[in-house]
Image (cartoon, grey):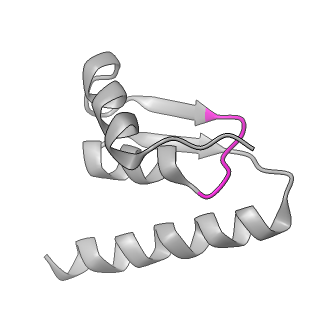
């Protein structure tokens, strides 16, 4: 299993993708790339085979979307 920090993912998306980009992550894991996409104003597609990781990613994304609605 590979993991990387949210900060690293934020930085890479900021460097390589303009706002509004569509980013595909074929190994979504727990949703780190997708969270960075939301923070950067990008759209995302992802896929994940592991149901546990899929559920964690959905929960993290749902929590962030709820926070963003409050702002």
Q: On the image, which quarter does residue 1 sit in?
A: top right
29 magenta-colored? yes
Q: Which residue is depicted at the point 62% across and 58% down?
A: 30
Q: Which residue is depicted at the point 28% across and 44% down?
A: 41
3 magenta-colored? no
Q: Which residue is depicted at the point 26% across and 28% down?
A: 14
Q: Which residue is depicted at the point 50% across and 50% down?
A: 32
- Judging depth in this view, the residue of 67 and 11 nearest the camera is 11
Above or below — where is 30 with respect to 62? above
Instruction: Give the extent of the magenta segment.
Output: 25-30
Q: Is residue 13 left or right of residue 62?
A: left
- Judging depth in this view, the residue of 38 and 53 nearest the camera is 53
Identify the main secondary structure in magenta: loop
Point out the image quarter for the C terminus. bottom left
- Judging depth in this view, the residue of 35 and 6 nearest the camera is 6
In this rendering, the count of numbered labels is: 0
Q: Where does the image place residue 16, in percent across and percent down from the top left?
A: 33, 17
Q: Where does the image place residue 19, in percent across and percent down from the top left?
A: 25, 32
Q: Residue furthest left?
A: 71
């Amino acid at each position: 299993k590979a993991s990387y920090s949210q900060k690293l993912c934020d930085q890479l998306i900021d460097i390589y993708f303009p706002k509004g980009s569509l980013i595909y992550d074929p190994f979504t894991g727990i949703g780190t790339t997708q969270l960075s996409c939301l923070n950067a104003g990008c759209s995302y597609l992802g896929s994940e085979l592991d149901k546990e990781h899929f559920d964690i990613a959905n929960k993290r994304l749902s929590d962030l979307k709820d926070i963003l609605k409050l702002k």
